[in-house]
Image: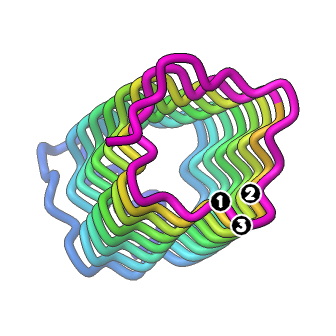
Amino acid sequence: MNADELLRQYKDGKRDFILANLADICLTERCLVEIDLSQSRLANANLSGSDLQCANLSAAVLTRATLWRSNLTSASLMSANLDRARLIRANLTSIDGDRASLRNADLRLANLAGANLSQVNLIGADLRYANLTGVDLTGANLSRANLTGANLAQANLNGVTLAHAIFENTDISNISNQ
């Protein structure tokens, strides 16, 4: 399926694109609210500036995808693969990213406030100046992650792996470590 076909079907009211092969697709600056792309292949896709509020991206493959300034508020990213994805300045507020993989992902200046990132793989992720206020990171792996200037206030870090993580000027006030 190409971008024009997906956008035509979306405009006609279709929201279910489960298992779609959309690798290398360019859907920049598009409104795709409540789209269901679960289990879809979106490797190398460009979704920069797109509105993906409440989207279902569960178990989707988004390796090396570009989502700069995209709005993923309340989206489901459960078990999604976002390894090496570029999510600079993305709005990931209140996402459900349980068991997602974001190895070496670029999340600089991203807003992840209130997100569920339990059991997430963030090995080598760049989280410089990201807003992680109130994030649930229970059991997450942040080995080698760069958290310089990140805001982890009120985050739950219970069982988090932090081997070789960088914490320069990081706000860790009122973190929960039960």
Q: Are marks 1 and 3 in contact (CB under 8 Å)?
A: yes
In the rendered view, does 21 fall on the left or right side of 163? Answer: left
Instruction: Read off the magenta span.
Output: 149-178
Instruction: Return the residue found at the far right.
Output: 168
Whether residue 6 is situated above or below residue 84 in the rendered picture: above
The 10 Å Cα crowd at callout 3, few under 14, some 14 to 19, many 20 or more, is: few
**Is residue 24 on the magenta stretch?**
no
- Please name the residue shown 28% across and 63% down the image: 78
The image quadrant of residue 32 is: top left
- The Cα atoms of the two marked residues, 1 and 2, are separated by 8 Å
Which residue is labeled 3 in the image?
A: 163
Q: Nearer the viewer, mark 3 or mark 2?
A: 3
Query: Measured from the top left, where is residue 133 in percent x and y?
Result: 48, 23
- Please name the residue shown 56% across and 64% down the image: 161
Which residue is labeled 2 in the image?
A: 145
Q: Which mark is residue 162?
A: 1
Label 1 sits on a secondary structure element that is loop
Query: Measured from the top left, where is residue 42 in percent x and y?
Result: 49, 72
